[in-house]
């Protein structure tokens, strides 16, 4: 403040005699180095304010209060005491004189045995589940095979009926042709031979299929004694009959187109 007044005096025209008002103003300011009266109560109040301000700045949000901290510590201590009591009771039952350390061989061996026991139990459970899955898969496969066998059996029975119907139809057609060619002895003889061939096949099919399907009434055979004397032909005889049948068909075509 003194330097400010001095600069103002210089701006006003040099070192003139200060007025009575200026002198009184300076006197009112007093000595800046004079002692200030501060009480002990003010110092305590300032210290408390600084401490509260520091705690407010440094204290994080959600910090644990002192009472809650003491409660948690006491609670953990209580649990530790209870756990210690439980360990002591078990050690007394197992007759363990000294509590095992982490590197104790007995503890390591026990952990190894526990691991082996758990693995054995897991393997046993896995085997049981695998057996159950295998049995279920086998049951499903067996049911599938059963359904497929029934389907194929139905197809075979249907094929048997189709073969019998075809042989009956062919026999009726050839027999009608024989009746129509009663004036032509050569063609009639060939047709009769073909009819006998069909009757052999029809007789064999009837004997083979009668145990599985219901057959229609057989036609009147040209060979009346065929039922009593007929023996199912061998494969060679059937092949020979097929060749003869092919020859008869060729002769019929020649006659038809001749």
Image: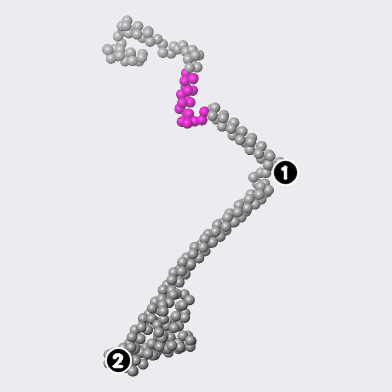
Sequence-wise, which precedes: disc 2 or disc 1? Answer: 1
Looking at the figure, which quarter contains the N terminus? top left
Given residues 102 and 172, the one toward you in this image is 172
Is 54 magenta? The answer is: yes
Q: Under tag 2, what secondary structure?
A: helix
Asked whether the beta carbons under mark 2 and mark 1 sit within 8 Å of each other, the answer is: no
Tell me if 55 is positioned left or right of 95 in this view. Answer: left
- The crowd level at tag 1 (other Cα within 10 Å; few <14, some 14-19, many 20+) is few
Mark 2, other Cα within 10 Å: few <14 / some 14–19 / many ≥20: few
- Nearer the camera: disc 2 or disc 1: 2
The residue positioned 63% from the left and 50% from the top of the image is: 114
Question: What main secondary structure does the magenta stretch of the protein show?
Answer: helix
The number of discs equals: 2
* Residue identified by numbered label 2: 255
Q: Position of residue 221 (x, y in %)?
A: 41, 86
Give above or below for 215 relative to 61. below
- Left or right: residue 119 versus residue 180 is right
Residue 253 screen position, x and y as percent? 31, 89
Residue 239 located left or right of residue 66: left
Q: Quadrant of residue 257?
A: bottom left
Residue at 56%, 60% (x, y): give it: 131
Please name the residue that numbered disc 1 is placed on.
95
Where does the magenta region start and end?
Answer: 46-65
Q: Is residue 34 above or below residue 165?
A: above
């Amino acid at each position: 403040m003194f330097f400010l007044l001095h600069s103002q005096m210089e701006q006003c025209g040099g070192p003139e005699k200060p007025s009575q008002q200026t002198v009184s103003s300076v006197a009112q300011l007093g000595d800046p180095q004079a002692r200030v009266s501060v009480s002990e109560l003010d110092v305590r109040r300032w210290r408390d304010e600084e401490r509260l301000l520091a705690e407010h700045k440094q204290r994080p949000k959600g910090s644990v209060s002192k009472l809650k901290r003491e409660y948690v510590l006491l609670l953990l201590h209580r649990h530790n005491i209870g756990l210690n009591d439980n360990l002591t009771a078990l050690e007394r039952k197992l007759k363990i004189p000294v509590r095992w350390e982490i590197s104790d061989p007995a503890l390591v061996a026990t952990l190894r045995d526990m691991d082996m026991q758990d693995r054995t139990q897991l393997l046993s459970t896995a085997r049981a589940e695998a057996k159950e899955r295998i049995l279920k898969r086998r049951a499903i496969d067996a049911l599938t095979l059963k359904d497929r066998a029934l389907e194929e059996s139905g197809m075979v029975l249907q094929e048997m009926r189709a073969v019998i119907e075809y042989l009956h139809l062919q026999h009726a057609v050839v027999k009608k042709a024989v009746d129509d060619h009663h004036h032509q002895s050569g063609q009639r003889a060939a047709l009769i031979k073909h009819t006998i061939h069909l009757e052999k096949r029809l007789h064999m099919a009837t004997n083979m299929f009668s145990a599985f399907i219901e057959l229609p009434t057989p036609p009147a055979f040209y060979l009346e004694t065929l039922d009593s004397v007929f023996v199912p032909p061998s494969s060679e005889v059937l092949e020979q009959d097929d060749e003869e049948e092919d020859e008869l068909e060729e002769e019929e075509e020649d006659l038809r187109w001749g």
